[in-house]
Amino acid sequence: MEYLSTTKKSAPDLRKGKNSTRIAVPKTLALQVLDIITYFLYNVQYGTLMVVIQDGVVIKIEKLEKFVISARSRDMKNVRVEAPAKPHPLQDKIVTEIQKIMYGQLIIRMENGQVDQIEKTEKKRAHEIDGFK
C-alpha cells in the first residue's frame, strides 16, 4: 500500500511552522497482506490479527491464534479453507479501513470462527495538525 503526497516539503520545513496540505491517495494493498488477512478470516477460530501501518505502509502484522480444546472440539474435524470461493463479507471493509490509516493499527479479533471486533487506532503527526506549532 502506497500513498502519494501533493507536497514536497521536508520534515524540517514542516517543523518550522510552514503549513502543508497533504492529501493521501490510497493505492492497492500488497498481495501478501491481503493473503494473510484472507487466511486469518477463513481459518482462525480464536485469536487476533494486528496490522501496524506507518507512513501509509503496512510494516508489521502480528497474528495470535488460540486453540480451545474441549470435548466438542475433539469430535469436530479441523476445516481449513485454503482458497475461498468468494471474499469474506468483511474483507472489503477491513481493506478500506487499512488503506485510510497513515499511522496506526487495525486489530481484528476472532471468536468462535466469527469476527468479534475490529479495532482501529489512528495516530496523527504534530506537523499535520493545522495551527499546531
Image (cartoon, helix red, strand yellow):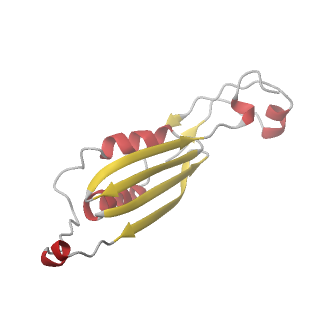
Q: Residue at x 78, y 38 (%)?
A: 10
In front here: 110 or 133?
Answer: 110
x then y, percent, for residue 87: 23, 49
Q: Is residue 41 visible?
A: yes
x then y, percent, for residue 16: 86, 31
Give the quadrant of residue 18. top right
In front here: 77 or 7?
Answer: 77
Looking at the rendered image, the quarter that the C terminus falls into is top right
Residue 83 located left or right of residue 118: left
x then y, percent, for residue 58: 52, 53
- From this view, report whether residue 127 is shown above or below residue 116: above
Q: Is residue 27 visible?
A: no
**Total residue callouts:** 0
Give the quadrant of residue 90. top left
- From this view, report whether residue 95 is shown above or below residue 84: above
Q: Residue at x 19, y 73 (%)?
A: 73
In front here: 71 or 109?
Answer: 71
Residue occupying the far top of the picture:
131
Residue 127 located left or right of residue 30: right
Residue occupying the far front of the picture:
71
x then y, percent, for residue 32: 41, 60
Give the quadrant of residue 36. bottom left
